[in-house]
Amino acid sequence: MRNRALHDALRDFALEAAALLVRANDEGAELGFALDERSRGGATLYRYRPLTSEFIGARWAKLRALPAFGPAARALGTGARAYLRRRGEPGADAEPAMRAMLERLYEDSTSFAFPEERFERVYEGVEWALYAGTVRATVVAPVLGLRFDGARLELGGDLALVDVALLAPPPAPAWLETDEGGNASPPTTAFLALERDLSADAGLPLAEARLRFRTTLTALRLLDPGGVTLAPLGYARVGDGAWQPLRLDPSGPARGPQRVLDSEEAARLAELLAALEEGAEGSLGWALDRFQMGLERRNEAEALSDYLLALRALLDTGRTADGATVGLRLAALCADEEDRPAVQRQVERAFELEPLVIDGSVRAVQRRSHGETAGRKDGLGPLVGELEDHLRTLLVEALCAAVEPDLAVMADGLLLRGDDPVEIRAGRLSEEEEEVRTLGTDPRPKQEVERGEEASPRANGSDPAPEARVYELDLDEESASYSAPV
């Protein structure tokens, strides 16, 4: 079988068609017969031939309305012309080709129960017509640190994640089975495979394979944390020929243990891959690159700046907000309201520790982060891990959104609708005096509040308002700031 997607689409249509035809037969529709006369050796032979083509034709309007018809027609596509030509019939559209296939499936049959073995023979004829004069090209890349359920996961566009057992003979050099110290490691079982039928004089799609393998690796890393990476060498072959080595684009090692991809995650992986192949531009694309760089650093401390830069790109569109504002927005998007202060403090702490990482003060970093990282050699590990998880969430949601969202605006909207008092200071870029408005649940009247000034007691004379910290907020033609309770 050379085209699994086409096979499955045509089989789904044939199954639905069989159910409809059997139901019609059970409801009283009779299958007609014709008496055929043949002369052989001076004798005349007679046989009754079932008129299955006429039975199918009388119900074709209902058959073409089946749910599986559209996907099957799209999968067959331009191959319809070749199949009809092989059958000696005119036409180039998928509809007459699919009707001809269905008639061939039930030719000379007196029952419309789905004939599994006969369908496979009919499908072989479809593939023979479609791929006559072509060769099968296969380009594969070993995926290290990954196992998955099943033998094959279709990812779309001739790309699949396949088990090594399907690549016979498998391209499995000895160096793939040992680590840097020469110790035996688990055998590589997962391969990315790009399979395509080409004319005999066409070149192999090597550049496309490299790009799509790297994009799939990005999708795997966005799906879930883990030490997934590509081997430095891939392989290519034509037909059943020998595997030839292929240099892959370097992906760098990834931190984390081996991960297992289950069948429920396969659809999510294909969705992420499709979104990535459409292209991520602007600040989203830049943040995605920083995320990849952070994953491939030797340790978490080196990844800290990459993740903070990515968060700034996503949450600080005006490039003027401080770390506290970035933390406030991240908390609004990634945490429930009661958990937001903890997330905000994590981000602020990360920004405070970054200069110590930059100047190499590793011991100082460990001392200052000792409280939340006891028992770890690298005191930044858990903190950077939390940043990585939050960043992964933001990137996935932004990539899979129908319209690229403005995450900063989304976060600001959530904060304004929250239960905690939020103060926005807005001043237009003109000679007018600054206007301060208090929104949310804070009952204080409109008043002037200067940066750094203590909050005044509430208007009702009860408990004083909590001490406030001011966070910069960007508005199109206004400079503004948040003042949120600490």
Image (cartoon, rainbow, N blue to C red):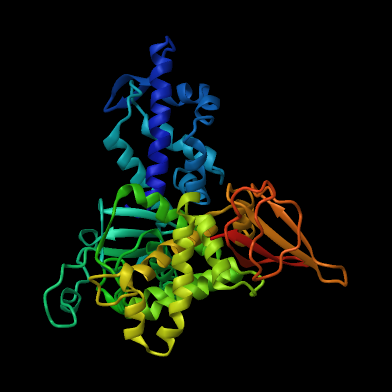
The residue depicted at 41 percent of the width and 59 percent of the height is 158
Horizontal side, residue 424 vs residue 401: left or right: right
Where is residue 84 shown, x and y percent of the image?
Answer: 49, 44
Front residue of 387/366: it is 366
Q: Does any portion of residue 155 appear in the rendered image?
A: yes
Q: Is residue 358 above or below residue 94?
A: below
The residue depicted at 31 percent of the width and 75 percent of the height is 379
Where is residue 403 shown, x and y percent of the image?
Answer: 62, 55
- Residue ranking furthest to the front: 461
Q: Does any portion of residue 201 appear in the rendered image?
A: no
The residue depicted at 87 percent of the width and 68 percent of the height is 432
The residue depicted at 29 percent of the width and 27 percent of the height is 40
Front residue of 83/412: it is 412
Front residue of 146/334: it is 334
Horizontal side, residue 222 vs residue 62: left or right: left
Front residue of 157/460: it is 460
Q: Is residue 263 above or below residue 320?
A: above
Where is residue 55 shown, x and y percent of the image?
Answer: 46, 21
- Residue ranking furthest to the bottom: 359
- Residue ranking furthest to the right: 431
